[in-house]
Amino acid sequence: MSLIPATILTGFLGSGKTTLLKRVLSEAHGQKIAIIENEFGEENIDNDILVTDSKEQIIQMSNGCICCTIREDLREALQLLAAKKRQGLLDFDRVVIETTGLADPGPVAQTFFMDDEIAESYLLDSILTLVDAKHAQQQLDDRQEARRQVGFADQIFISKTDLVSPEETQALMHRLRHMNPRAPQQAVHFGEVPLSEVFDLRGFNLNSKLDIDPDFLTEEDHAGHDHDHDHGHGHDHAHGEHCDHPSHQSGHHHHRDDDVKSFVFRSERAFDPAKLEDFLGAIVNIYGPRMLRYKGVLYMQGTDRKVIFQGVHQLMGSDLGPVWGQDEKPCSKMVFIGIDLPKDIFLQGMEQSLV
């Protein structure tokens, strides 16, 4: 049986997760989707569209979707759904897990890597984060959960932009980009998102593409930060597609200093695999809980192929990617997104892991 793709849907209270889910559950899109609501007494989706006896845990929808409300372990719900699918009792193509508004998506994501039984049935596709344009600035100021949800995202949907000015939306997008330059952002109206932008995003695939918002890199390169790392070369790396010298950008905020920040390491020198492994092992041991997402395409000594690397909290993994192209200059690029990470220690350690 092929692996069942899973999507984690997160976002702060009132950001529009339920609206988006209702659309997925009631639209005739031809996909059979199982929704797991990892809820604790918040507004539940079933009040409106599920007319059912509450003792029943798994409810079949009119368009072939399934809704499963869990009060216990996510792992058990995933195992139950996979078992029923194997036995032919339930038919579904993919799973969407809606976390509570206060949830940290990290442990949910880790379930797919740490648990062998889950890993044999499911493939984690991506983490989607909904952000409410009207209340986001305040929520990001006040609540670390909201900032973490942004840091984990593979895709950010911004709802309620009609309630704020274009300038406010721009300021919010700017702030979110500094927290997470990996995640594309898109304004959505009442959950109207094409399913192609919700599913099969492959955010956790180990592929050789490292999406870092090019504006983030360009903006930082010309913002005059980090003179201590200037190696006396020209600052020409617009779009971040080549590495002129080890350059390190940080997501410093011009008006607010969030604890969730991102920074990028780049170098054209190869990594010493043993040194890098030792260093990454050490930082994950110390800072793992504060490391939300980190991903890189690395130039390693001893192989002519790209090494694709990524991690969530304490879990990390790498894979050999394609061979470096003939017209491609091998170089490493790695983005770290985390909570108050000591940037200097990270960048110095990466530098010292080079050949």
Image (cartoon, rainbow, N blue to C red):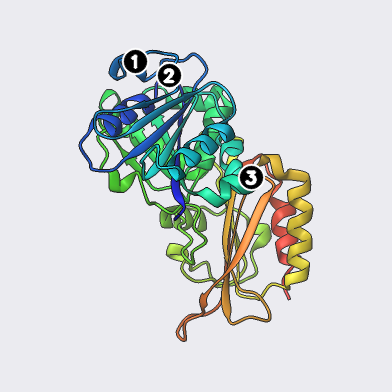
Is residue 256 visible from the viewing direction of this image? no
For the C terminus, the image quarter is bottom right
Is residue 14 visible from the viewing direction of this image? yes
Q: CA distance from mark 2 to mark 3?
A: 27 Å
Label 2 vs label 3, nearer the camera: 2
Q: Amino acid at mark 1?
A: Thr
Q: CA distance from mark 1 to mark 2?
A: 8 Å
Image disc number at residue 147: none
Write the residue at 54% across / 38% down. Answer: 79
Write the residue at 48% across / 80% down. Answer: 328
| Cβ–Cβ under 8 Å for marks 1 and 3 | no
Q: What residue does disc 2 label?
A: 56
| Cβ–Cβ under 8 Å for marks 1 and 2 | yes
> Who comes first in sequence, dot 1 or dot 3?
1
Q: What residue does disc 3 label?
A: 115
Crowd rating for badge 2 (residues with CA inside 10 Å; few <14, some 14–19, many 20+)? few
